Image (cartoon, grey):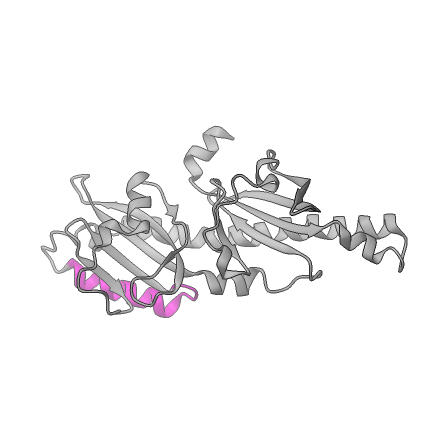
Amino acid sequence: MKGLKSQIILIIILVSVLPLGIFTGLITYQNYNRTYNNIFSHLEVSTKNRAEILRTYFKPIFDMANMLSNDANVKGAFENKYDERVWMLKNFDNIIKNYGGYDAVYLGLKDKTMLMKPDMELPEDYDPTVRPWYKAAMNKPGSVVVSEPYADASSGEILITVSKTVKNEKGEIIGVLGIDLSIKKIVETFLSEQMYEEEDPYIVDEKGITLVHEDPDKWGLDVSSMEFFTKATSNEGVVEYTYNNVTKLAFYYKTCILL
């Protein structure tokens, strides 16, 4: 797994948390063991299914980032000898119009130039090179990365960005390509349907940073020290832990975005 992790960059861990008290609440209606087994089985399956659907969702976005970072017009956009920026932005515009779920596609250049679609009004002193998505990609050159949640400089909306460094034909890094994704839309897609009201799903990265949760206050929350995260040592499973004096079960499934 260590070798794989170094290539994959991002491991998504989908965790479904459920208080154990739900079982005792249902015991008067049906046999405890049967109730426990049914709920246990449901959460095992639904957690795995959600994680696999999530991987399927992210895979083409990662593929798009890889493809665009190697596009001749993107690679030539810094020097712009042959109007590469014009053709690149036309391509970005077509992608926004034809692929659902992308809030923006852009290239931040090392000289602080920002080229993006759709057109947005950015602050006058906007500097892409200090933004979380730019720095995340620069920390892992040549790899597709996913940023921690951050506030968009134009709209203020909380986003995550899939990004990758871009090199020119000389092999020099000229900037970072980014694809913005709305966390709100991801929540609506993956976490809207739950069988149990007490179910509390998280999507976290390998560092324990919460990428997606129904509660916007938890976007970006560091759960790396929480028991459900520290006990999740295998690729999938269930752990029992206590939080605020409440015993809970956490079902988890780790999925590699790139396989």
Residue 7 spot, x, y in % from top left: 42, 35
Give whichever of 182, 72 is nearer the camera: 182
Above or below, 214 against 139 in this view is below
Tally of numbered discs: 0
Horizontal side of 228 relative to 185 (left or right) equals right
The residue sitting at 48% across, 64% down in the picture is 184
Residue 108 visible in the picture: yes
Q: Position of residue 235 (x, y in %)?
A: 60, 37
Q: Where 60 sits versus 193, above or below?
A: above
Q: Which residues are magenta?
A: 84-102
Measured along the vertical axis of the image, is residue 133 above or below residue 215? Answer: above
Residue 243 placement (x, y as % from top left): 64, 45
Foreground residue among 41 and 4: 41
Magenta stretch: helix, strand or loop mostly:
helix
Q: Is 107 on the left or on the right of 9, as rendered? A: left
Horizontal arrangement in the rendering, residue 169 relative to residue 155 (left or right): left
**Which quadrant would residue 123 be assigned to in this image?**
bottom left
Name the residue: 38% across, 65% down: 157
Residue 15 within the segment the image draws in magenta: no
Tell me, yes or no, if residue 141 can be seen here: no
Q: Position of residue 150 (x, y in %)?
A: 38, 56
**Residue farthest left in this picture:** 81
Side of 57 where 65 appears, left or right: left
Q: Residue furthest front?
A: 245
Task: Tell me what residue is drawn at x 60 percent, y 44 percent.
Answer: 253
Instruction: Please check the rendered image and state whether residue 97 is part of the magenta-colored stretch, yes or no.
Output: yes
Front-most of residues 125 and 35:
125
